Amino acid sequence: RVQADPGQIEQVILNLAINARDAMPRGGRLRIATHRQTLERAEPPHPAGDYVVLEVSDDGVGMSEQIRRQVFDPFFTTKGKDQGTGLGLATVYAIVQQTGGTIDVESAPDQGSLFRVLLPQAAELPDSAAPRPTTSHLPRGDEMVLVVEDEPGVRSLAVEFLRSHGYRVTAAADGREALKLLDTFEEPVDLVLTDVIMPGINGPEVAERYVQRHPATKVLFMSGYTDEVLGWDEPTVAARLVQKPFSIEDLVTKVRETLDEGGTKGLAGDLARRSDQQPHSEARPDDEEPVN
């Protein structure tokens, strides 16, 4: 047993599985395993202690030592232009750290990769008679929400969280796909929930187009970076940010707050000023393992 948010652990597994899939373009085997392990002494980056170990491995193209050292860095990607943002494994790292765990990776060219997540074992077992935590107290709605997110694991979680709380949800894999949907809806979208930094067309550009066409549409951004790092000092924009990794409570609460707040006056102008200032992912050589 460990103390962790189930939704975030699911996101860890999904992101690691997607990374393994991309590392096996000709097919291969994905293995997921768990076991308990006690480290009598520290084995960096893992301190000594009792752990539950989650292992995700593949027999794909593997990675060089240089790539392996950078694999968890935000925006680092070996994918081609417009194919990835480099936030998938950075999100995994952030979740594991937030949970009090550690992660490492073993890999070599043409020998696949093994990611090991070590989560501290829970010191005490929960009272079996205690009620299971529920999300029934969280706010609900029936509005139409467009989710724009290029990381499949994050996108699927956001869609699942919102649908489970009554919202009607449509999803787009990137900004280009989101803009194609702009004229296809029979009724205006009530909320655009979009990642900030995506390959090609970024989140602020998508939001600006929707708000210009439908001024009543609300906007909520997602990002693994704070508004300070993104350089968002305008309150009309910075207040509309939910941090990754997010829990179901974080997301549905922020969505409800955004839908219930006042109009979007001034938002389009703020977005226009910011849309050209967001960092874009850096393309890496195509002959390395495609790291999300």
Image: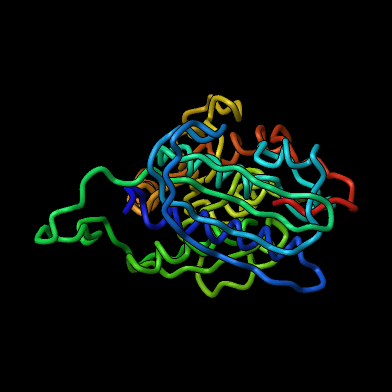
Q: Where in the figure is residue 281, as x and y percent of width and height?
A: 76, 42
Q: Quadrant of residue 204?
A: top right
The image's colour scheme reads rainbow
What is the count of numbered marks?
Answer: 0
Q: Quadrant of residue 270?
A: top right
**Image check: 19 left or right of 23?**
left
Q: Quadrant of residue 27?
A: bottom right
Q: Where in the figure is residue 114, as x and y percent of width and height?
A: 65, 54
Q: Nearer the viewer, residue 217 or 62?
A: 62
Residue lying farthest to the front in this orientation:
40
Q: Where in the figure is residue 289, as x and y percent of width and height?
A: 80, 53
**Image check: 49 left or right of 31?**
left
Q: Vertical placement of 128 versus 264: above or below?
A: below
Q: Nearer the viewer, residue 266 or 172?
A: 172
- Who's the residue at 41% across and 41% down the image? 99
Q: Where in the figure is residue 195, as x and y percent of width and height?
A: 59, 48
- Who's the residue at 53% across and 59% down the image? 13
